[in-house]
Image (spheres, grey):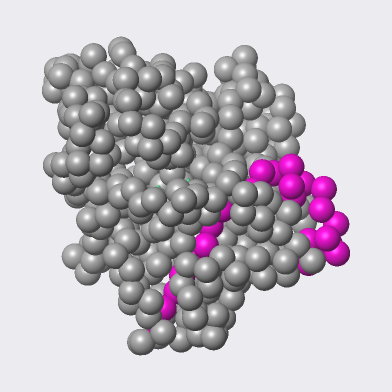
């Protein structure tokens, strides 16, 4: 066995690092503070219902480097059913007007042109950009370990899309829509409602639609929890050690090398390498006491915008409520749910497409809305209990508004807040996907190492603006590739 790697955190990034660590012959231990693995990729079981917290779409369900990772880590196998929705989301504005986002670009283009014939040219240009961005393929190897010939081939393949990079790599959606010169105010207001009101990367927006169009960002039947369970099973089958319900308090550093970790109960766990797949801010500023920083990290944690936390209200229903769209978004800027005024509206995800979420003949609907961290950070226990009660009342009123008569079928409910996410995963300020991909940072991933600290790597969503499951899985793999390089071992995927 030889060298030991300690991995802090058993979310998707930590599980990925654990699996690749074992595949490469390391003595590998994951230390997870919660009783279950998966981190934010999780679900709650309640009286026969499963309330999913994460998975809407998983980039890499069909092909490419992310697909390799999902197969190598047990996320995808022949028994896992993948579905590709025809409709991504249906949006309703305050006056009840409907706007559909189709996943097929041909179909969406046709729909958009009939929605706003005066914008036909701009719509065609946008859809062309989206189709072109399909040439963008993520790198399979990390920076510094890329085969020059393979990199050259990849670059060559990406050539058609280089202009998109140059034009929109550092622009946001607002600028992008302005450049396209859309005229129809209703169309523009729907685009704006998606991402236009914030500094959201134009390139991230464009690429997202290419993945859907390629059917390479599907949904896995069963959702988040079974996905995390499959990864955990693979890690344990390979002989990995999982220590749950133990929180890492400090990373031991001696002579500028990570030497292991100290748990909150004082236990010392020695290691040859430490990989932190826990929250980025917690790792850098608590476990390492802010001693290893570079201007790039300082700038990111001080200035980059974070994802606004979410509140999720889940309903187990004694009946199936058919819906043509998996997600219905209501742009009600004035809706009041608890203390939050829903500036970006609220959505209902109707899980009728996944029969594993509820007993036969029953169903699950989940409401989600953004609620800024400021609403939550100083709440007392009493205020919190009252707020959850109020949220349930208000949310149910909106549910009833959109599904008349539904209230009498509610059998089970659950309210998960930004504080729930922080309590169970330690995610900084409830920013469930880390840094928002913006005009400033989409091209600026953070490095996995900190200056002046050897034998230490980071993995997880906080290294890649935009976050999500694919970067989490990939960063775990990359961390082990770096360790293999240090150990002069040929990296293997099993
Ligand atoms: C509502 C919602 C919907 C989402 N939808 C999607 C989607 O459709 N597609 C997608 O790709 N992504 C989605 N995401 C984002 C995705 O869930 C995250 O980006 C991803 O799970 C992050 O993985 P991670 O391993 O980097 O971090 P985390 O999941 O945050 O894992 C960190 C782990 O470290 C543990 N930990 C923290 N501190 C310590 C410590 N001191 N000691 C020990 N353990 C510690 C935590 O308990 C946790 O298990 C969604 C997230 C949410 C909340």
Residue 381 within the magenta-colored segment of the rendering:
yes
Residue 207 visible? yes
The magenta stretch spans residue 429? no
Q: In this view of the protein, which residue sits in the foreground, 306 or 88?
A: 88
Left or right for 264, reference 172: right
* In the foreground, 259 or 83: 83
The location of residue 484, given as percent across then percent down, is 37, 34
In this view of the protein, can residue 471 be seen by the observer? no
Residue at the image position 31 percent from the left and 38 percent from the top = 208
Which residues fall within the magenta stretch?
A: 362-385
The answer to whether 297 is drawn above or below residue 100 in the figure is above
Q: Name the spot of residue 280 as percent of width and height, x first.
A: 60, 37
Image vertical order of residue 101 relative to residue 136, above or below: below
Q: Position of residue 459 (x, y in %)?
A: 49, 38
Task: Identify the residue shown where x is 58% and y is 46%.
Answer: 333
Give me the residue at 38% from left, 37% from top. Answer: 186
Residue shown at 40% from the left, 67% from the top: 350
């Amino acid at each position: 066995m030889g060298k030991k790697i300690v991995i802090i955190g058993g979310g998707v990034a930590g599980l990925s690092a654990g699996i690749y660590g074992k595949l490469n012959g390391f003595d590998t231990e994951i230390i997870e503070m919660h009783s279950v693995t998966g981190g934010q990729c999780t679900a709650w079981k309640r009286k026969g219902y499963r309330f999913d917290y994460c998975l809407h779409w998983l980039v890499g369900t069909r092909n490419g480097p992310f697909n390799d990772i999902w197969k190598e880590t047990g996320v995808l196998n022949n028994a896992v059913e993948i579905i590709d929705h025809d409709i991504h989301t249906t949006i309703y504005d305050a006056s009840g007007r409907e706007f559909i986002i189709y996943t097929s670009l041909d179909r969406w283009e046709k729909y958009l042109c009939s929605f706003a014939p005066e914008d036909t040219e701009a719509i065609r240009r946008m859809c062309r950009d989206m189709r072109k961005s399909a040439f963008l393929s993520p790198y399979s190897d990390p920076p510094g370990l890329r085969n020059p010939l393979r990199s050259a081939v990849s670059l060559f393949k990406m050539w058609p899309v280089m202009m998109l990079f140059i034009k929109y790599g550092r622009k946001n959606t607002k600028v992008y829509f302005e450049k396209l010169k859309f005229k129809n105010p209703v169309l523009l207001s729907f685009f704006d409602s998606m991402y236009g009101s914030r500094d959201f990367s134009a390139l991230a927006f464009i690429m997202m639609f290419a993945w859907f169009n390629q059917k390479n960002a599907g949904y896995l039947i069963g959702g988040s929890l079974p996905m995390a369970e499959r990864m955990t099973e693979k890690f344990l089958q390979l002989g990995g050690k999982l220590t749950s319900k133990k929180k890492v308090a400090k990373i031991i550093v001696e002579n500028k090398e990570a030497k292991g970790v100290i748990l909150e109960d004082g236990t010392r766990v020695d290691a040859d390498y430490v990989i932190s797949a826990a929250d980025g801010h917690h790792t850098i500023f608590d476990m390492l006491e802010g001693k290893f920083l570079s201007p790039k990290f300082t700038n990111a944690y001080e200035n980059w915008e974070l994802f606004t936390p979410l509140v999720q209200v889940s309903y187990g229903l004694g009946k199936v409520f058919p819906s043509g769209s998996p997600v219905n978004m209501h742009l009600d800027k004035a809706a009041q749910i608890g203390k939050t005024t829903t500036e970006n509206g609220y959505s209902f995800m109707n899980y009728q497409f996944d029969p594993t979420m509820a007993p036969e003949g029953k169903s699950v609907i989940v409401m989600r809305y953004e609620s800024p961290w400021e609403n939550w950070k100083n709440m007392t226990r009493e205020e919190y209990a009252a707020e959850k009660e109020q949220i349930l009342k208000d949310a149910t009123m909106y549910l009833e508004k959109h599904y008349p008569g539904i209230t009498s079928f509610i059998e089970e409910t659950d309210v998960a807040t930004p504080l729930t996410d922080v309590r169970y995963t330690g995610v900084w300020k409830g920013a469930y996907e880390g840094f928002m991909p913006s005009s400033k940072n989409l091209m600026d991933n953070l490095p996995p190492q900190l200056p002046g600290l050897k034998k230490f790597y980071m993995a997880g969503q906080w290294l890649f603006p935009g976050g999500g499951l694919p970067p989490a899985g990939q960063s775990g793999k990359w961390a082990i590739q770096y360790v293999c390089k240090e150990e002069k071992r040929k990296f293997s995927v099993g």
